[in-house]
């Protein structure tokens, strides 16, 4: 006879071994579901990491807890774990039956059911217990479907359906599993001290054309000024003034090239007019047509009557 469980209920089990089967219906957005078991001591924690049996560690070292291959059935998918309750070490006080999903929360998994079978019974026998696993919020990615616990000389099952939003890692760490997910980049304790002091990052190159390879930066020397007075700092449009007579000439860093010469244009000579009060120039071609030069009469006494 199959007992249909509700959340929080419990029932004694009359079986030496249990096969726990998770079944769910297919859906386009349904994530993949995995079953697992944790063997817990009296303190509610695993005795070692080997007490966590799941798809990456499918067999307990004792061989008494196993994860079986996932199967496709007519109405969906199944994932199965088996535990030999009667042969377990007395140090195992509880066995947690859990489920985790990858690719989304459990609200996307339709018709999730846990069924417990007698592992020693016929292959097609009816389950001893069925429990419709309904998450509390739907955001869980790991669920404690139920737990098997010792009671007097036998075992009982309690239906739970409690979950974690942190997935299989959160479930495992809750029960004392040391999980190495490979994402941590924290250095080991003391690694920084062993490596010595941190090297300084290179900064911007110093200005002024001087490179400080080591030690403090070296400033460019100031050019000498006139009689001990420093020259003013040049600026982009600065034109250095000529020093007074007798002062030392500053050494120019660069001498600008002379401006390009304007092309010479030959023009007709123009007559120059002398300034006022200066004698007039004598023309060289003032001879009469016959080529003879005659002085003009000088004064009125040379005038004829």
Image: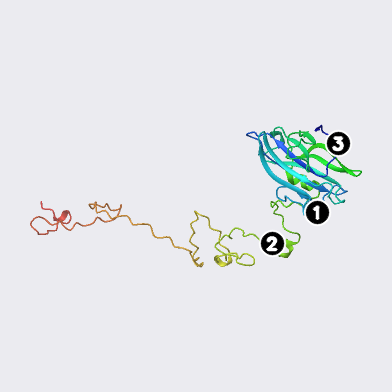
**Which quarter shows the N terminus?**
top right
Position of residue 288 measured from the top left corner of the image (x, y, whole percent): 11, 55
Q: Earlier in the sequence, mark 2 or mark 3?
A: 3
Q: Which residue is mark 1?
A: 48
Gap in angstroms between the C-alphas marked 1 and 3: 29 Å
Q: Which residue is mark 2?
A: 198
**Residue under the image location 75 percent in, 44 percent down:** 81
Please tell me how crowded label 2 is: few (under 14), some (14-19), or many (20+) other residues with Cα within 10 Å: few
212 sits left or right of 288 in the view: right
Q: Which residue is mark 3?
A: 11
Position of residue 304 measured from the top left corner of the image (x, y, whole percent): 10, 53
Residue 127 got which mark? none
The residue nearer to you, when weighing 88 against 106, is 88
Choose mark 2 or mark 3, whichever is in front.
3
Q: Secondary structure at mark 3?
A: strand
Total labels: the figure holds 3
């Amino acid at each position: 006879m199959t007992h249909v469980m509700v959340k929080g209920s419990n029932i004694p089990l009359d079986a030496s071994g249990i096969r726990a089967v998770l079944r769910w219906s297919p859906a386009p957005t349904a994530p993949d579901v995995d079953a697992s078991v944790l063997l817990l001591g009296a303190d509610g924690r695993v005795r070692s990491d080997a007490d966590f049996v799941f798809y990456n560690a499918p067999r307990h070292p004792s061989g008494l807890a196993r994860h079986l291959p996932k199967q496709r059935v007519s109405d969906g998918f199944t994932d199965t774990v088996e535990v030999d309750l009667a042969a377990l070490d007395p140090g195992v006080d509880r066995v947690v039956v859990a489920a985790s999903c990858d690719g989304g929360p459990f609200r996307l998994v339709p018709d999730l059911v846990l069924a417990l079978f007698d592992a020693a019974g016929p292959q097609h026998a009816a389950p001893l217990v069925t429990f419709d696993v309904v998450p509390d919020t739907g955001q869980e990615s790991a669920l404690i479907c139920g737990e098997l616990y010792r009671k007097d000389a036998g075992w009982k099952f309690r239906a739970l359906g409690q979950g974690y939003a942190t997935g299989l890692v959160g479930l495992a760490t809750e029960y004392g599993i040391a999980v190495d997910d490979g994402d941590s980049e924290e250095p080991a304790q003391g690694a920084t001290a062993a490596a010595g002091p941190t090297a300084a990052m290179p900064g911007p190159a110093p200005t002024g054309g001087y490179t400080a390879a080591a030690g403090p930066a070296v400033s460019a020397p100031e050019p000498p000024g006139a009689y001990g007075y420093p020259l003013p700092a040049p600026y982009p449009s600065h034109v250095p003034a000529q020093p007074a007579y007798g002062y030392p000439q500053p050494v120019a860093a660069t001498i600008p090239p002379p401006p390009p010469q304007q092309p010479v244009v030959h023009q007709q000579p123009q007559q120059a007019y002398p300034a006022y009060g200066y004698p007039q120039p004598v023309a060289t071609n003032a001879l009469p047509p016959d080529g003879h030069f005659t002085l003009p009469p000088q004064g009125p006494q040379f005038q004829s009557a």
